Image (cartoon, grey):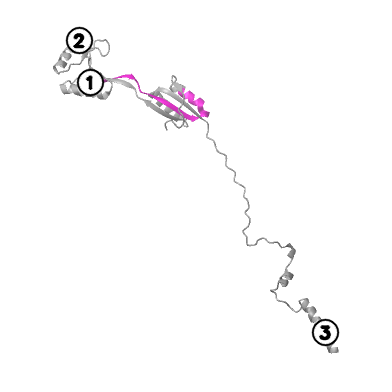
Amino acid sequence: MRLFVFLLILANLLFFAWTHEYLGVSRDSDAYRVNQQLLADRISVVSNDQPPPEVSRPEKTAKPVERAPAEVCVALGEMPVAAVESIEALLTEKLPAFKVARTAVPGNSSYWVNIPPLKNKREAENKAAELKKFGVKEFFIVQESGPNSLAISLGLFSTQEAAESALDTLRDKGVRSARITERPHKPAVAHVEIRGPEAQAAELNQIIAQAAPESSRGACKPRNASSQ
């Protein structure tokens, strides 16, 4: 009887020890892991094998567009070439920010083939007789007073090439005293456009007034059509 009571008490003690894990348990068990956790209620899952959510980044603000400084354009029509060169020199010295674009307009001239004025009427008539012997038929003696009086005209031509061809023909015939004289009717000119900062427009006007006081002003061509 005592042995039975002893065995019963021993069984109860073993059951108590087993239920309270006094007999040792595998450390791989879930219960052991739970018991070993510190402050388990404060643990939160930060990753579940998924990529982290994208964090929106603030968009870069666009840089303000810098505007080009205001520009002024002055157009000058039919200026003598010398006046244009004077304006260019003054701008280079005083207002280098301004740019000059010029369009040349060629002058208009005629070319006179002639024998220079002779000393008197008799010499002019002797020269005319000599020309007839050379087979020259188209000529006349200049009778008007002036620097060309008593010269012998052998032809007036609109181009230098035509005048040179006529002179070669005369020389082939034996005329050696003939020459070509250019007779300008309209000198070469230029149309000008001057562009630069509007802030210096007053200084530009002073330079134009100094170099070309009688110049006429007009409208500039559109930027895309102006010569570069």
Front: mark 3 or 1: 3
**Which one is nearer the viewer's eye here, 40 or 142?**
40
The answer to whether residue 190 is above or below residue 152 is below
Q: In this figure, which residue is indicated by the disc labeled 3?
A: 8
Mark 1 vs 2, N-terminal side: 2
* Residue density around tag 3, few if under 14, some if 14–19, many if 20 or more, within 10 Å: few
Q: Rate crowding at label 2 as few (under 14), some (14 to 19) or many (20 or more) other CA atoms within 10 Å.
A: some
Q: Where residue 49 appears, x then y in whole percent?
A: 63, 62
Q: Is residue 203 magenta?
A: yes
The reply to whether residue 201 is visible in this rendering is: yes
Residue 50, by quadrant, is: bottom right
In the depicted view, which residue is nearer to us: 122 or 114?
Answer: 114
Q: Quadrant of the N terminus?
A: bottom right
169 inside magenta stretch:
no
Above or below 26: residue 105? above
Quarter of the image for the C terminus: give it. top left
- For the magenta stretch, what is the residue range? 179-208
The amino acid on which the numbered mark 1 sits, given as a three-letter code, is: Arg
- C-alpha separation, residue under disc 3 versus residue under disc 2: 175 Å
Q: Residue at x 74, y 63 (%)?
A: 41
Question: Which disc number belongs to residue 179?
Answer: 1
Q: Secondary structure at mark 3?
A: helix
Using the image, determine if residue 58 lies above or below residue 111.
below
Q: Residue at x 81, y 81 (%)?
A: 13
State the residue position of label 2: 121
Q: Which mark is residue 101?
A: none
